[in-house]
Amino acid sequence: MSEKRYLILAEGRSADPHYGKTMRGIVRFRRSEVVAIVDSERAGARYEDVPIVGSVAEAAPYAPTTALVGVAVAGGRLGPEWRTLLVDSVQAGLDVEAGMHEFLADDAELSELARERGVELHDVRRPPPDLSVPTGENLTHDARVVLTVGSDCAIGKKTMALELHIEAERRGEASVFVPTGQTGIMIAGWGIAVDAVVADFLAGASERLVVEGARRGDLLWVEGQGSLIHPQFSGVTLGLMHGSAPHALVLCHLAGATEIEGCPGHPLLPLTELVELHERLSLPARPARVAALALNTSLLESDDQARQAIEAAEEETGLLGDDPVRFGAGRLVDAVLAHLGERATLVPPGINAK
């Protein structure tokens, strides 16, 4: 099978860290080559090392094989302006991967066009048909499970899990990133988008993921979803917590944020209260403690400001914290392994353990 060459569709969102998070995750952690990004509003610019073009046709010289919908939108549904992009991609002979709640393969016009052009429509958010409730295997496998949880949505729970996994793998651990959302699936090539699962089976889907992860390795970093305090997306968080039955939690937080994004009037809780909340709501059969804080300091301009925010969070909670994107994941992996009973050497803030 030939290697994929991705054309990421990010119309109007290539500069947006929130709604363009799928694009950013694929570019940062890509397994396959990303050859171009489509965003007519920023044609001629670049994101990282990837050129941005104005249309699917303009991407032809880069010889893509697969168009990937690189935006995350509230409710998981694309607006009508996206239909032209999708049709253009299929007509150009490209397979299309998407992670929306509305499945492309269920669209009669797109499906017929895909058949005519001999291309595939892959809906990564479509759950397996045979899911059910947990069986108890989430408590009997031999792997160590760490789940990222967060003060809000779209603050880096997937990114933190991937950075921690990469660092653990670098150390020789049999480490596995366990994908629970569409972007994670696109990065890792397997997984279940748990937010698309029938509510009764959400914990069962999460169990299936960690059981599969345990077949692949013995240190699992489960991608978190939603937030326990989010007025719209708290349900997926609790189901994932109970179904994955983690041994430890890593609490993620966007430094400087004070309110739930997109929900005015819904303030964030203090970190100490968030730690207590997550620990109290963990599965009684396997109580989990927060092992460390993973801070997203992207809103802070300087490294000194970031270190000050990390130190303040550490002082507030009594837990070790760091930003694995800005300063490396070494200290956080040390803290988690120490929490799990492993030997680790802790180093000063902002310095990656080697």
Image (spheres, rainbow, N blue to C red):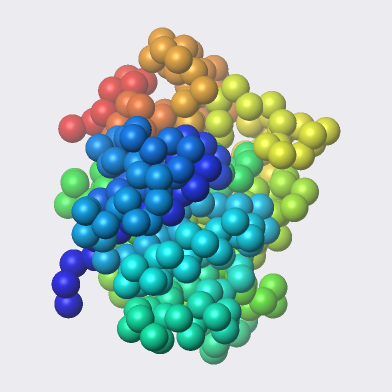
Viewer-proximal residue, 93 or 326?
93
Q: Quadrant of the C terminus?
A: top left
Q: Residue at 66% x, 52% y: name it.
A: 74
State left or right for residue 309 relative to residue 229. left
Residue 43 placement: quadrant: top left
Viewer-proximal residue, 24 or 235?
24
Q: Quadrant of the N terminus?
A: bottom left
Expressed as whole percent of the image width and height from the top left, the position of residue 251 reads: 53, 41
Expressed as whole percent of the image width and height from the top left, the position of residue 349 reads: 36, 20
Residue at the extreme right of the image, as rendered: 265
Residue 283 placement: quadrant: bottom right
Q: Is residue 221 visible?
A: no
Expressed as whole percent of the image width and height from the top left, the position of residue 120 reads: 38, 79
Q: Is residue 81 visible?
A: yes
Expressed as whole percent of the image width and height from the top left, the position of residue 123 reads: 48, 73
Is residue 182 shown above or below 216? Answer: above
Q: Residue at 69% x, 49% y: name it.
A: 228
Is residue 169 shown above or below 345? Answer: below
State left or right for residue 24 relative to residue 32. right
State left or right for residue 9 relative to residue 30. right
Is residue 64 shown above or below 262? Answer: below
Q: Residue at 33% x, 83% y: name it.
A: 118
